[in-house]
Image (cartoon, rainbow, N blue to C red):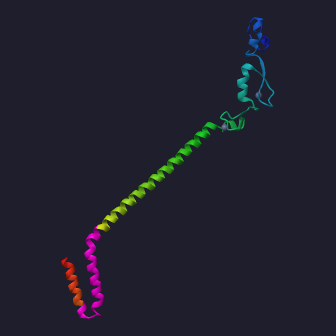
Amino acid sequence: MCRNAQQGCRATFPLSNEYLHISNCPYEWQLCPHEGCGQQVLRKDAQAHDQSCSHWRQLCPMGCGTLLVRENQAQHNCYRELHQRYVAERRRQRAIAANLRRKMQRMQSRMAQIRRQINLMCESLEVGDLEAEEGEGTAWTDANATSRSSNRHRHTNSSSSRVRHI
Ligand SMILES: [Zn+2]
Ligand SMILES: [Zn+2]
Ligand SMILES: [Zn+2]
């Protein structure tokens, strides 16, 4: 007969097996392991008591060093926190990458624009070489036609007609 028969153990075993049985008899009294509790509970009820023991405390199993108690156990979820931090970090890095990509695209389009402008400028320079000289000549003519002699005026006319010929 088990020494815990009073608590309800029905187990029978040879005396030589008593130690073996007692070490896992569900009706063995155990002291609650949580400091300050001091309650005796049957081994079979230990888990249920652990769930409701007001002195329950445990270092966070994730190793963050937080002493978990009943009150903060529900809020504290190291994995969840780590996961959230990881997700936030990923989101931040993705935002930075997207930002860089946008900047690069903007720079590329600006470079394409500049290239277009340079091409236009080259085209207008090639064609406009003569136009520019002609324009200058006209301006020189306008500025000097009234104050200077008609001799110069004639010279200008001949020079601009020469330019047109080329
Ligand atoms: Zn027993
Ligand atoms: Zn307890
Ligand atoms: Zn933790």
The extreme top residue here reads: 14
Q: Where is residue 138 in the image (x, y as percent from the top left)?
A: 27, 83
Q: In which quarter of the image is the N terminus?
A: top right
Q: Can residue 135 be seen in this view?
A: yes
Kindly identify the residue that appears in the image at 56 percent across and 45 percent down. 89
Q: Work out whether residue 8 can be spotted.
A: no
131 in relation to 20, above or below: below
Task: Identify which residue is drawn at 24% across, 86% down.
Answer: 156
Residue 132 lies in the magenta stretch: yes
The segment highlighted magenta reads 123-152
Q: In which quarter of the image is residue 123?
A: bottom left
Front in this rendered view, residue 92 or 28: 92
Residue at 72 percent of width and 29 percent of height: 52
Which residue is rendered at x = 29% and y = 81% of the image? Answer: 136
Q: Where's residue 4, x and y in %? A: 78, 13
Task: Tell me the quarter of the picture where residue 45 sits.
Answer: top right
Q: Is residue 134 above or below residue 59?
A: below
The reply, left or right, for residue 35 in relation to residue 90 is: right
